[in-house]
Amino acid sequence: MSTTQRIPAEQQAREATDRLSAAGVHGVALTWVDVAGITRVKAVPTDRLASAARTGVGMSPVFDVYLVDDSATTSPHIGGPDGDLRLRPDLARLTPLAAQPGWAWAPVDRFEQSGEPYAACQRHFARRTVERAAERHGLELKAGFETEWVVTRADAAAPGTSADTPAHATPHVTPHTALHPAPHAPLRYPSTGPAYGMARLVELSDYVRDVLDALAAQDVEVLQIHPEYAQGQFEVSVAPTGPVGAADLAVLVRETVRAVSLRHGYTASFAPVVEVGGVGNGRHLHLSLWRDGRNLCEGGESDEGGEGPNGMTADCEAFLAGVLRELPALLAVGAPAPASYLRLQPSQWAGAYQCWGLENREAALRFVAASPGRPGAANAEVKCCDPAANPYLVTGAVIAAGLAGLEAGLRLPPPVAGDPAHAGTQPRLPTSLPEALGHFERSKTLREALGEPLFGAIAAVRRAESELFDGATPHEIVAATRGRY
Ligand code: GLU
Ligand code: MG
């Protein structure tokens, strides 16, 4: 990094420090999300922020091969106690945290000590694919993640400490206390209201208001918030933004919901499944493609556009066809845990089939067409992704798959209407993590886009988590992971 680049960052950090100090902020949480989907953190006192922005904060690269239980595996490039990386906060994203008074937050990019971007940095990867879309295809992407969570009373069994834990964690990993047996107690929900029920909103009125207030205080633009299908489940969706920013927001929204929940004596679970047999938590990704200020998902009347199905342009069709083709491999990124496959069941609105459909909530790829009342709002939703996934990896991998479709000029198959589980004609997506991993390992598109260090780390972590839970019952998997994300 050159001196000319360093000075503005340092000035920016000093100004930010003054602003934060005046606002009573004592510490800044610097986060990144690992391959297993866990948000890891190093925090600095506010007056160290400038130094963190300049030289970074140290952290071991081994976390890239950490599993959901805090044990570690190894990959061809990563593993063991050696080495150090520098975490450098993105000050443009610096946000005082409304539900954690005295704290601010910023996501980091990770660098080698030499100053080179770290090859397995997930945020760099997402940014690289966004840049590739712009440079090669003149495309700008807008994205937004939905956040679903289940709220329980914090005085119920501490999540992740149930007796239903696999007794046979493999020698591949070091079993961690998080998965050690502890007395099991049933979950207790602070509300009993029905799915999408106003009763649930009334019961948790102050809580939901505080979620809204905290997000608004952090300048997060909320589109809607509602009680979801499962017991104690809610969802919030936020306005679309650039893909890297959307992944940052996914982190910020989750941690904000977590903090507000704790202040109300609740625990928020962001696991793919919280109760076995119930509807799980998804974290769907919405994407739209733009060129020269026009949404390519709704070509409309322009000369260039509209020749694809449902008014989308040919470029949009090819991009979505690329995503659709790659879904079995993408699952190893977007549905990354053994628990993900307990969620990804037919007829649960989770998107268990490799098909697309117009406003079809059972299709893994749901197209939301333009409508007269919402110009510019057409987009595609990747539904099969869940909150165990790293949002930066999901963003980058989905875009990489779309760009491959664009470069190959792919066409979409006919859309599917109705529940594909009933039609029996559509391919089911992988039903287990090992099956998804097999597709991932054969995916040239994802391998090339991710680069070997990141590709190898993802494969290693998926394999090790499969082994960790090999033979475990659904109850054991859910009990061991519901409090981890
Ligand atoms: N909870 C569902 C899931 O697992 C999604 C429900 C919805 O369509 O919002 O993805
Ligand atoms: Mg939902």
Image (cartoon, helix red, strand yellow):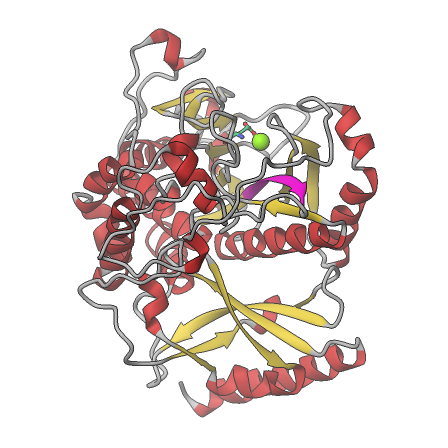
Left or right, residue 423 beside residue 203: left
Q: Is residue 36 above or below residue 331?
A: below
Would you say residue 179 is visible in this rendering?
yes
Q: Is residue 150 shown in magenta?
A: yes
Q: Residue at position x 33%, y 46% from top?
A: 167
Please say whether residue 88 is one of the residues in the magenta stretch: no
Residue at the limit of the structure toward the top, as seen here:
423
Spot the residue most to the bottom: 3
The foreground one among 62 and 382 is: 62
User: Over which residues does the magenta segment extend?
Assistant: 145-153
Q: Nearer the viewer, residue 3 or 57?
A: 57
Please, is residue 309 above or below residue 149 in the view? above
Q: In x, y percent, where is residue 212?
A: 76, 47
The residue lying toward the viewer, choosing from 458 and 465, is: 465
Q: Residue at x 35, y 33 (%)?
A: 473
Q: Quadrant of residue 347?
A: top left
Position of residue 90 measured from the top left corner of the image (x, y, whole percent)? 54, 71
Q: What x and y, as percent, mark residue 164?
A: 43, 40
In percent of the image, x 79 and y 51: which residue is there? Answer: 213
Image quarter in which the N terminus is found = bottom left
Residue at x 16%, y 43% (from the top left corner)? 442
